[in-house]
Amino acid sequence: MALYSDKVMDHFRNPRNVGTIEDPSGVGEVGNTACGDIMKIYLKINDEEIIEDVKFETFGCGSAIASSSMATELIKGKHVSEAMELTNKAVAEALDGLPAHKMHCSVLAEEAIQAALEDYKSKKAQ
Ligand code: FES
C-alpha cells in the first residue's frame, strides 16, 4: 500500500485556495514547534456569517499542504458555526487518511482555521 492516498498526492501537487485575501475578515497563523512548519489561513466572511472565500499559505511538509488545501475546501461556503466544528480527523478522513506520524500535520489545519475564526470573532466584537 502506498504511504499516501491519491487524494493526499492530488491536494499536495495541486493545492486549492493557495494565496492571500486582501482585507480579510479573519486571519489565523499557527506553527508546529516540533517540525517548524507554519500555516496561515485567511477568511472572507459575509454579513450572514458565511465563509465566502478562504485562502492559505503553508510553509510545511506535503501533508500539511494537502491538509490546508482540503480544510479550505471543507469550510468554503459554510457557516462560521459549522466551520468551528471542523476537526483534524475530518480533514484526514476527507483525504482518505494520513499516516499516523503525519496526523499532526492535519492538526495544524484545524488550529489555523480555529485561529482565523477567533480573529474574525474578536474583530467583530469590537
Ligand atoms: Fe510538520 Fe507535517 S511535518 S506539519
Image (tube, helix red, strand yellow):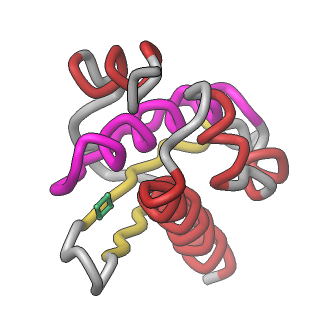
Q: Is 109 positioned to the left or the right of 114 in the image?
A: left
**Is any atom of residue 26 visible in this view?**
no
Q: Residue at x 33, y 77 (%)?
A: 32
Q: State yes or no: residue 89 in magenta.
A: no
Is 14 on the left-hand or right-hand side of 29?
left
Kindly tell me whether residue 98 is visible in this rendering: yes
**Residue 11 in picture, x, y percent from top left:** 36, 22
Which sits in the foreground, 44 or 33? 33
Q: Position of residue 81 (x, y in %)?
A: 83, 53
Q: Residue at x 46, y 21 (%)?
A: 1
Is 10 rendered above or below residue 26? above
> Horizontal and vertical percent for residue 97?
59, 35
Residue 88: image quadrant is bottom right
Ligand 1 shows up in which quadrant of the image?
A: bottom left
Residue at (72% x, 42% y) in the render? 90
Q: Position of 84 compared to 113: left or right? A: right
Name the image quarter holding the C terminus: bottom right
Q: Residue furthest front?
A: 1
Q: Residue at x 40, y 63 (%)?
A: 27
In the rendered view, tell whether residue 120 sits above or below residue 66.
Answer: below
**In the figure, 76 relative to 102: above or below?**
above
Which range of residues does the magenta coloring cover?
52-78
